[in-house]
Amino acid sequence: MSASARASASPDTTALSEQIAAISRAARAAAHALAFAPSDQKNAALREMAASLHAARRTILAANAADVAAAKRDGLAEPLIDRLTLTEPRLTEMVRSIEAVIELPDPVGETVRSWRRPNGLEIRKVRVPLGVIGIIYESRPNVTSECASLCLKSGNAVILRGGAESFRSNQAIGAAIAQAIAAAGLPSAAVSLIPTADRAGMELMLQRHEEIDVIIPRGGEGLIRMIAERSRIPVIKHAKGVCHVYVDAAADPDMAQAIALNAKCQRPATCNAMETLLVHERIAPTFLPSTIEQLRHAGVEVRGDERARAIVPGIAPASEADWSTEYLALILSVKVVPSLDAAIEHIRRYGSAHSDAIVTKDDSAAQRFLREVDSAAVYVNASTRFTDGFQFGLGAEIGISTDRLHARGPMGLEELTTYKYVVLGNGQIRE
Amino acid sequence: MSASARASASPDTTALSEQIAAISRAARAAAHALAFAPSDQKNAALREMAASLHAARRTILAANAADVAAAKRDGLAEPLIDRLTLTEPRLTEMVRSIEAVIELPDPVGETVRSWRRPNGLEIRKVRVPLGVIGIIYESRPNVTSECASLCLKSGNAVILRGGAESFRSNQAIGAAIAQAIAAAGLPSAAVSLIPTADRAGMELMLQRHEEIDVIIPRGGEGLIRMIAERSRIPVIKHAKGVCHVYVDAAADPDMAQAIALNAKCQRPATCNAMETLLVHERIAPTFLPSTIEQLRHAGVEVRGDERARAIVPGIAPASEADWSTEYLALILSVKVVPSLDAAIEHIRRYGSAHSDAIVTKDDSAAQRFLREVDSAAVYVNASTRFTDGFQFGLGAEIGISTDRLHARGPMGLEELTTYKYVVLGNGQIRE
């Protein structure tokens, strides 16, 4: 966080507390109105949002330039500055992703299931919005408009708390969004931002359990642990991905190599990229040398266990910590395992239950892997990089849940809803 | 809690902490085995459980008699002693409800949905167990076997923490269950009990977030608030039901009277019983006198707002606190409202979003009520008493969730599962 952002964001705590309370109550009131807003009106608001962001692009880019300048002054790492930076093409991308949300079906009001009881009662399980969603995220300012559009489409009010380093960008984007929502005749409190980059704002937000129904944190381990510890509100964690590709004894070596390269290198900074390659000992001597050569050729730093290092000279040793590290970079840990069981055991012990793949032609090995590896997504003969709402054909997502309750894996519009039972009778009473 | 239970249940805290940790780790290990146990084996274990409870009935009844004697010594209220007391018929009922769970379909492994992507990837959304479930409840010892059977059937390990007053009964039931599970070749740690009635045991349990996936509390407001505040583990609350019947201006008065009587009197101690009757001012003068007479005839103590008291003399005044009170008894608060809007607003303000009904012949009033009252179950022309897994045709339930995330309303076998994505490829990589 820049010194100036910190200074402008430290008002008296009581005033801040009242401000966060007012924002939360306004969001709760907005949620009531949004819950019954027809799809047409929500889509109209989304179109206004897209137009408003386009119209405000100069203001947004100027705010972002100030954020980037402050980040550089503060010595932020280059990849973080890249994530923070908005450009005309990235703004166009933001506008386009709102347009994509307009095209998605509205989940609210959908009857998931209906049936009739012997006493004549008709029961319908109907999707309704969750209510008020709090999203806490880091760095990328485009997350602000993505989350706002998905929450609005699913009839939820949202309170956003972005990273301190993108505070000015988020405020500019938020102002454009609020204006658009009001223009469409919906309450502008449907989307609000925590008005300070101070951590105090987030802590106060986590206490508003009377108004906020769920907190979705997206970010680093430290942030997520802190939120899980302090939140009075239920949390759906979007935590790390320590993803594995296991190359079975019965793997097609060419396919395994292509999958390993893709899972590691195609976009290493994503949570569904591979961090550890497990190789069955029977295939390792023939598979590892050329695969590691290819990986190195692609710029990957390889760290291995003793057996991998015995097969391919010059690999750095992997430490115990490596096996549970999400590198998010061109670094890979490699381990030779004696069996499928050992691979499954390794994944259970060190993995984060995000996305894990087996490459094999052996159907029974594949079935065991699919059954016994309990991750949000388990793959046979495909890259882990497909764990993504668009790739799954589910549309845009708030993120990838690494939790087990309510939503697991890609969390899209449907996962932003809950349900209620609608029961139609003609005088039924219970005997 | 009886003095003797308290004395026997206060070991040194470090030892207790280690004991709870060991129980939690054993449950986690058991959950891995249970997750892949075939339905046949789980059903065999359930049959063993039923037989074992039957065989141990003398031991269980003796333990229960000791609990009841202690409760009487401690001056526990009569309804609580009734809930605590086991009898031969109640034990038979416990055995029967396990047999009913055997008959229910196993949700684990079910493919909820499957589809194929243009690149040939086949994606299946498959039900898997939640993992380790912690259940905290009060009073009734039959909850122990009900929860154990539902968790086992859905492939989950469970850690149970019952009420202090039923500690001996629960231990006896738990011992019979553990023996049965082991006899069926499953890990007996699939079902375990917190070995102390002390609150310290529960507090330590709420810290085991590495092993326990979800806490389900069933009980009074104080217990649930405490758990929501202290738990490091996600909580699905089974809290109070402040349920309403709203008699619209266009109600059939006979139907409305029958529904009001049923919702209040058929079993007043349940969470889906009506606590507040709202009556439209146009129908109140003709509807209220005979309805309140009938309610009083059924032993109901009626408390009313000023307008109700003006219509029916002799009604005690309702205080502000009455409107949000779950009586769980033959007490009813009555309010005359000027409009449907006022009824909806009252329910939103004072209700607990459990079960609420409108009685009306006016379809547009019914539709507005169904849409705008955001409760787990909303009814037209039927008693709120139907909010129940069996009555909905969903089978036995752990309880009625009053939360919005993951499970809402009756929480049965399906709601005790989550899902994972199984992705089948033939070498797909991401472009």
Image (cartoon, coloured by chain):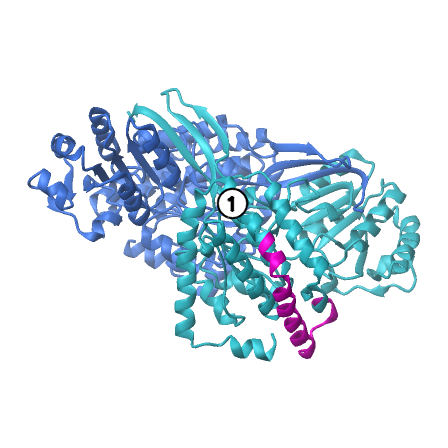
Chain colours: A blue, B cyan
In this rendering, position of residue B141 left or right of residue B196: right
Residue in the image at 53% along x and 45% along y: B44
Residue B287 position in % (x across, y down):
90, 49
In this rendering, position of residue B392 left or right of residue B186: right
Residue B7 vs residue A230, the one in the foreground: B7
Report how many numbered discs are placed on residues in the image. 1
Query: What element does badge 1 sit on?
Result: helix
Q: Height in image: A264 above or below A134?
A: above
Q: Is residue B262 visible?
A: yes
Give the residues drawn in magenta, as a range. B51-80
Q: Height in image: B84 above or below A20?
A: below
Residue B100 vs residue B285, the one in the foreground: B100
State the residue lying farthest toward the front.
B55
Q: Height in image: A173 above or below B66?
A: above
Mostly what secondary structure, the magenta segment? helix
- Can you tell which quarter of the image residue B70 is in? bottom right
Q: Amino acid at mark 1?
A: Lys
Residue in the image at 23% along x and 39% along y: A278
Q: Is residue A70 magenta?
A: no
The answer for which chain carries disc 1 is B
Q: Which residue is mark 1?
A: B42
On the rendered image, what quadrant is the N terminus of chain B found in?
bottom right
